[in-house]
Image: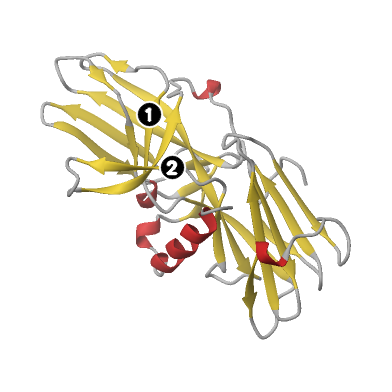
């Protein structure tokens, strides 16, 4: 499979290996009788596009990977299938436009930004994933009014496209439509955009195959900025593929695994 839908359930025979290349991420999932072995590497270009998925029979393809590069997930007996699914990252993003963006008084526009995905890997059709693997590991930044009032977020940059047709679609990233409203008498300098992905659902646009999030609205008034999520399908016919993280159980455990997987890989 090349540049098609990479997520779903895939048959992996005994001793076989699934290999997914998704943007900068290369992910291996090897099946043994009583364990799955999962390994990953990343290239330097975090904006690299493309998606390729191959399942190799025992002893074929995928090259050799040193034992130290694997995480092992033991169980009584592995299923004959492995399920890959996309999800949004485990922290909010703060993205800064490359070029200064100013919204004139009493104007409203839609800005399109993208954020990287994580790949969830589950044994068979289990509801809980064995692990989540981030496509890339962004740098961190602080979002808050003071050093005591705020939270650690991921940092990113954006072209802040006003025309979605100009946005380069990458299967390793999700697109968010941000409604900017300036209710002030002066121009609004959009220095950075707060994207609360942990509060947003992930959707698949069946017409295009693109992954999109809930829309968000940023309203600038006299008292500052207000950010709100607009739950629901971003386009007609979109199918929800992941609910918001803040509604899920057991996220703290996955966050610890994500931190490990994001470091030094």
Q: State left or right for residue 131 relative to residue 256.
A: right
Residue at 73% across, 62% down = 66
Q: Is residue 90 left or right of residue 69?
A: left
What residue is rendered at 64% in x and 35% in y? 49
Residue 9 visible (yes or no):
yes
Which of the 4 image quarters holds residue 136?
top right
Residue 107 sits in quarter = top left
Q: In this view, does 192 lie to the left or right of 135?
A: left
Q: Which of 18 and 232 is in front in this view?
A: 18
Helix, strand or loop under label 2: loop
Q: In this view, does 262 lie above or below 68?
A: above
The earlier-in-sequence mark between 2 and 1 is 1
The one of 208 and 193 positioned closer to us in this rendering: 193
Given the current orientation, which residue lies at the most extreme right position? 60
Residue 161 image position (x, y, % from top left): 45, 22
The residue carrying pointer 2 sits among few (fewer than 14), some (14 to 19) or many (20 or more) residues within 10 Å by Cα, namely few
- Name the residue that disc number 2 marks: 139
Q: Which residue is located at x 40 percent, y 55 percent?
A: 244
Using the image, tell me which numbered label, if any, was put on residue 237: none
Q: Count the marks: how many?
A: 2
Marks 2 and 1 sit apart, C-alpha to C-alpha, by 13 Å
| Image position of 52 with respect to 245: above or below | above
Question: Residue 262: x and y, percent?
Answer: 52, 54
* Label 1 environment density (alpha carbons within 10 Å; few <14, some 14–19, many ≥20): some
Residue 78, can we see it? no
Closer mark to the observer between disc 2 and disc 1: 2
Q: Position of residue 53 (x, y in %)?
A: 74, 50
- According to the picture, the residue beneath numbered tag 1 turns out to be 96
Relative to residue 55, is residue 143 drawn left or right? Answer: left
> Vertical placement of 36 versus 179: above or below?
below
Indicate the colouring scheme. secondary structure
Q: Where is residue 213? Give x, y as percent.
A: 45, 43
């Amino acid at each position: 499979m090349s540049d098609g839908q990479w997520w779903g359930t895939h048959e992996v025979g005994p001793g076989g290996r699934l290999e997914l290349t998704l943007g900068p991420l290369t992910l291996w999932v090897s099946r043994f009788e009583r364990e799955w072995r999962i390994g990953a590497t990343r290239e330097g270009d975090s904006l690299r596009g493309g998606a390729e998925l191959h399942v190799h029979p025992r002893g074929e393809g995928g090259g050799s990977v040193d034992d130290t590069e694997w995480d092992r997930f033991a169980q009584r007996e592995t299923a004959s299938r492995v399920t890959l699914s996309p999800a949004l990252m485990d922290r909010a993003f703060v993205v800064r436009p490359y070029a200064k963006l100013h919204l004139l008084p009493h104007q409203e526009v839609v800005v399109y930004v993208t954020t990287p995905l994580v790949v969830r890997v589950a044994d068979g059709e289990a509801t809980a994933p064995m692990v989540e693997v981030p496509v890339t590991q962004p740098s961190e930044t602080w979002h808050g009014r003071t050093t005591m009032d705020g939270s650690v977020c991921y940092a990113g940059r954006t072209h802040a496209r006003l025309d979605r047709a100009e946005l380069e679609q990458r299967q390793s990233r999700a697109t968010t439509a941000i409604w900017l409203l300036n209710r002030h008498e002066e121009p609004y300098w959009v220095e950075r955009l707060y994207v609360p992905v942990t509060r947003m659902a992930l959707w698949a646009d069946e017409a295009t195959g693109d992954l999109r999030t809930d829309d968000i609205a940023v309203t600038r008034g006299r008292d500052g900025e207000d950010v709100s999520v607009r739950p629901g399908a971003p386009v007609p016919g979109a199918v929800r593929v992941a609910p918001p993280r803040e509604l899920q159980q057991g996220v703290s455990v996955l966050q610890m695994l994500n931190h490990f997987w994001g470091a030094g890989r």
